[in-house]
Image (spheres, grey):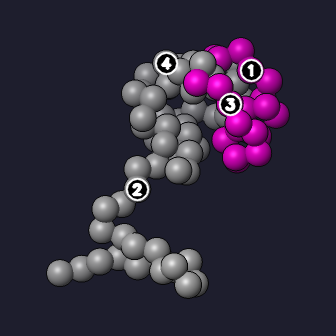
Amino acid sequence: MELRIKDVLKEKGIAIKELALMIDLATPNLSNLINGKSKPSIDVFDRIATALNVPISELFEQPATDVITCPNCGKRFKMEE
C-alpha cells in the first residue's frame, strides 16, 4: 500500500517542513517516512492525520478495484467493460 501524504499536503497547500513542525518531527525524518525510507508508528500516522485534519485512511492509497497487475511482468492494466 502506497502512502499519499504528498498528495494530501499538495491538496492542503502545506509544505513538508510545515507539517514536520506541526507534528514535532524532524523534517528529514518526515521526508524519509513520506518517501517510504522509514516505517513510522501508528502514533505518527495519527499525528499526521490530525494535523492535516483528514481521516488516517486518507494517508494511504486505496487499491483500485478495476486494475489488475500482470503476474509475469508486473504491468498494471485497467479493466473495462
Query: Viewed as shown, does residue 79 lie left or right of 57?
Result: left
Q: Residue at x 53, y 50 (%)?
A: 1
User: How far is mark 4 from mark 3, CA to CA?
Assistant: 15 Å
Q: Amino acid at mark 2?
A: Pro
Specify the segment rendered in magenta. Answer: 22-42
Compare marks 4 and 2 and give the one earlier in the sequence: 4
Q: Amino acid at mark 4?
A: Thr
Compare marks 1 and 3 and give the one earlier in the sequence: 1
Taking the view exactly as shown, the residue that stands out farthest to the left is 81
Q: Which residue is mark 2?
A: 63
Question: Are the residues flagged by discs 1 and 3 in contact, CB closer than 8 Å?
Answer: no
Q: Which residue is mark 3?
A: 40
Question: Is label 2 in a helix, a strand or a loop?
Answer: loop
The picture places residue 48, in percent across and down from the top left corner, at: 57, 25
The picture places residue 26, in percent across and down from the top left corner, at: 80, 24
User: How far is mark 2 from mark 1, CA to CA?
Assistant: 29 Å
75 or 26: nearer the eye? 75
